[in-house]
Image: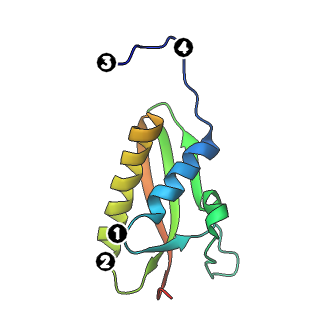
Amino acid sequence: MADKVPGDLHVANDVLADIVGYAAMECYGVVGMTAPTAADGIAKILPASRLRRGILVKPTEEGVKVDLYVVIEYGTNISAISQNLVDQVTFALKEYACVPIADVDVHVQDVKVRK
């Protein structure tokens, strides 16, 4: 059994966003992440190096609130993929960052055919 180390651990929101981004991209049916604001109504898929731009992490009293902005694959079940994303992100944050989760919201910005 590991010894307890006194003190507090603070994980930056950008690190949490990276963990969320990598967890989200592992989910079946997710084509990519997109920025929260689609200025011209067209969602552009972000490159892997900029995944955190498609994720908003906000600390609250209950824990962290996560908003994911995703593009999913055409022909897949939006509800099932959204629930899978919530489960995957919740697991990753609890397992790797040991942070309490207040809420995970999935915003499907577009549906695309995977190339």
Q: Earlier in the sequence, mark 3 or mark 1?
A: 3
- Which residue lies most toward the front here? 1
Q: Earlier in the sequence, mark 4 or mark 1?
A: 4
- Badge 1 amino acid: Ile
Q: Which mark is residue 77?
A: 2
What x and y, as percent, mark residue 51? 61, 61
Task: Evaluate if marks 2 and 4 touch, with contact meaning CB atoms under 8 Å apart.
Answer: no
Per the image, the residue denoted by label 3 is: 1
Other-residue count near label 1 (Cα within 10 Å), few / some / many at <14 / 14–19 / ≥20: some
What x and y, as percent, mark residue 84? 33, 62
Q: Which mark is residue 7?
A: 4
In the drawing, does residue 55 fall left or right of residue 80? right
Other-residue count near label 3 (Cα within 10 Å), few / some / many at <14 / 14–19 / ≥20: few
- Badge 2 amino acid: Asn
Of helix, strand and loop, which one carries label 3? loop
Is residue 67 visible to us here? no
113 to 93, vertically: above or below: below
Residue 4 picture quarter: top left
What x and y, as percent, mark residue 41? 63, 81
Per the image, the residue denoted by label 1 is: 81
Task: Evaluate if marks 1 and 2 touch, with contact meaning CB atoms under 8 Å apart.
Answer: yes
Count of all numbered marks drawn on residues in the image? 4
Q: Nearer the viewer, residue 115 or 79?
A: 115
In the drawing, does residue 13 fall left or right of residue 111? right
41 to 37, vertically: above or below: below
Of helix, strand and loop, which one carries label 4? loop
Is residue 10 visible to us here? yes
Label 1 – label 2 distance at C-alpha: 6 Å
